[in-house]
Amino acid sequence: MQIKVLGSGAGGGFPQWNCNCGNCRAVRAGTPGFKPRTQSSLAVSANGADWLLLNASPDLRQQISAAPELAPNADDGLRASPIKAVALTNGDVDHVAGLLNMREAQPFSLYAAGRVLDALGANPIFTILQTPLVPRIELHMDEAVAIRGAGLELGLAIRAFPVPGKIALYLENANAPNFGTSAGDTLGLEIIEAATGDSFFYIPGCAKVDAPLADRLRGAKLAFFDGTLFQENEMIEQGLLGKTGSRMGHINVSGADGSIAAFAPLGVKRKIYVHINNSNPLLNAFSNEYAIAHAAGWEIGEDGMEVRL
Ligand code: MLT
Ligand code: MN
Ligand code: ZN
């Protein structure tokens, strides 16, 4: 299996268009240790020719331009794309807005939880992806489903499962507080190569490593995991947004309930942070926090990173 990190940043990317925080200033200035990051997405292929996108970020057009394997082949027909399917982990803007870049009457399959498909279905702009060409397929929890798209089998399966998380920000209702989660608002995905049975986990949004998630991850070969914030109050302390990590539905990297501690006993062989927010000190490769995560066996995801499994 070939895996490519298209975007390792969280919503807003890095730098974020309207942000003048220390990290965003530093990356704009080209300071050593800081690299720009586009928004949250991975691409996966079993045969190197046909690709599955995991989330479709608002930066998808730029991400495709930076990834030759995602461009039409010169000997393909007049309209063509190696991208045959997209699977979504939630309905957040950073994970669905790229679908709008995938109009132009190109066939591919769209996989998501029922609640996310409902959110897309309630928004007429997504009818630009016409349903005969772009079938919307519900991911049922804990069922491995073979991924097909544009008439092809991709040689990949997805087993989706609910993780603690949050309803999409734009669906939060201040008058009838619905903060929290219903199963299917936030998914983790296990991507399985059909030929070998090898698999990896992609969990870019997750509020807590609870016991079922820990059991699932134990001994995994590879996990891409929510690296949004290093610590609970970092956005408040930097004066960016009056919200904690937990209020945003994201686990922190550090602390007793953080992901470094939660993964420590699980024996996951390769652990890579993705969905990293622009406030996170992990974005400075020379920071103490980077050294702490690295010493705990974590890699800090970067755009363009390639992993073979
Ligand atoms: C998140 O991951 O918390 C969301 O992307 C927030 C947002 O929609 O901006
Ligand atoms: Mn996000
Ligand atoms: Zn910033």
Image: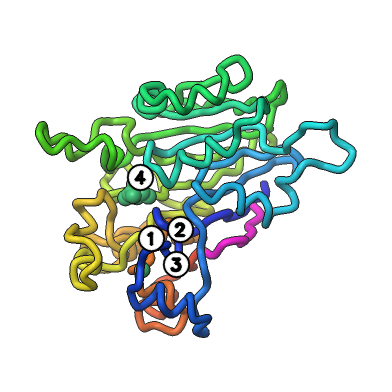
Quick check: is the Cβ at mark 3 less than 8 Å away from ligand 3?
Answer: yes
Looking at the rendered structure, the kind of residue marked 4 is Asp
| Image quarter of residue 77 | top right
Q: Are circles 1 and 3 on residues that touch, CB within 8 Å?
A: no
Spatial CA span between label 1 and label 3: 16 Å
Q: Would you call the spot at circle 3 few (<14 residues within 10 Å), some (14-19), or many (20 or more)?
A: many
Spatial CA span between label 3 and label 2: 15 Å
Spatial CA span between label 4 and label 1: 20 Å
Please say whether residue 230 is visible from this viewpoint. yes
The numbered dot on residue 15 is 3
The numbered dot on residue 274 is 2
Whole-percent x, y for residue 102 in the image: 60, 35
- Does label 2 or label 1 sit earlier along the sequence? 1
Q: Is residue 177 magenta?
A: no
Please name the residue that numbered disc 1 is placed on. 227
Q: Are circles 2 and 4 on residues that touch, CB within 8 Å?
A: no
Please name the residue that numbered disc 4 is placed on. 215
